[in-house]
Image: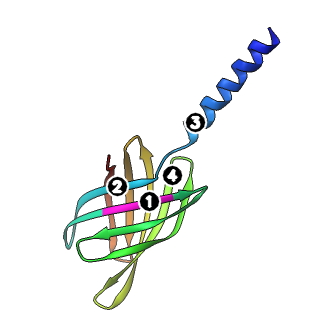
Amino acid sequence: MIRKTAIAIVFIMLACVGAHASDFNGKWTAQFDTPVGTQKYTYELHVDGAKVTGKAINEHDEVAIQEGKIDGDKISFVEVANFNGMELRIVYTGKINGDAIHFNRQVGDFGNDDLTATRVK
């Protein structure tokens, strides 16, 4: 009886851990409207523990992701873009839901955009 109870407890604990682990690894694509027109992005995300690295790729540029962090089902990172010779800091915060990440991105002091990136399968 004790052995069955111990096995049940282990399975419950594994299920809880699995429920909190979100897989952000891989390629994600998004298309969204902004004040400067439609943007098409591919995000290549690589997770190592709570750290995220990778690239944000659009029609004009490919930028290394900076300051990437994972906290359960939440993600944040920074894209530093070049806009007319000036650095433009774009801060992403998002939450994963299956094969979609719902992001808000703050584009410098200019405003923000909501977008959804979907996993490339």
Disc 2 or disc 4, which is closer to the eye?
2
First reached walking from the N terminus: tag 1 or tag 3 = 3
Residues in magenta, as a range: 42-46
- As helix, strand or loop, the secondary structure at mark 2 comes to strand
Badge number at residue 59: none
Q: Which residue is mark 3?
A: 18
In the image, residue 53 sits, relative to residue 26, either above or below, namely below
Say whether residue 43 is magenta.
yes
Disc 4 or disc 1, which is closer to the eye?
1
Question: Whole-Å distance between the Cαs marked 3 and 4?
Answer: 15 Å
Residue type beneath disc 2: Trp
Q: Which residue is mark 2?
A: 28
Q: Which residue is mark 1?
A: 45
Q: Residue at x 32, y 52 (%)?
A: 116
Q: Which residue is mark 4?
A: 74
Residue type beneath disc 1: Leu
First reached walking from the N terminus: tag 2 or tag 3 = 3
Question: Whole-Å distance between the Cαs marked 4 and 1?
Answer: 13 Å
Coordinates of residue 111 in the picture (x, y in percent): 33, 71
In the image, residue 31 sits, relative to residue 79, either above or below, namely above
Mark 2–mark 1 CB contact (< 8 Å): yes
Q: Is residue 13 rendered to the left or right of residue 68?
A: right
In the image, residue 114 sits, relative to residue 17, either above or below, namely below
Please tell me how crowded label 1 is: few (under 14), some (14-19), or many (20+) other residues with Cα within 10 Å. Answer: some
Question: Whole-Å distance between the Cαs marked 2 and 3?
Answer: 22 Å
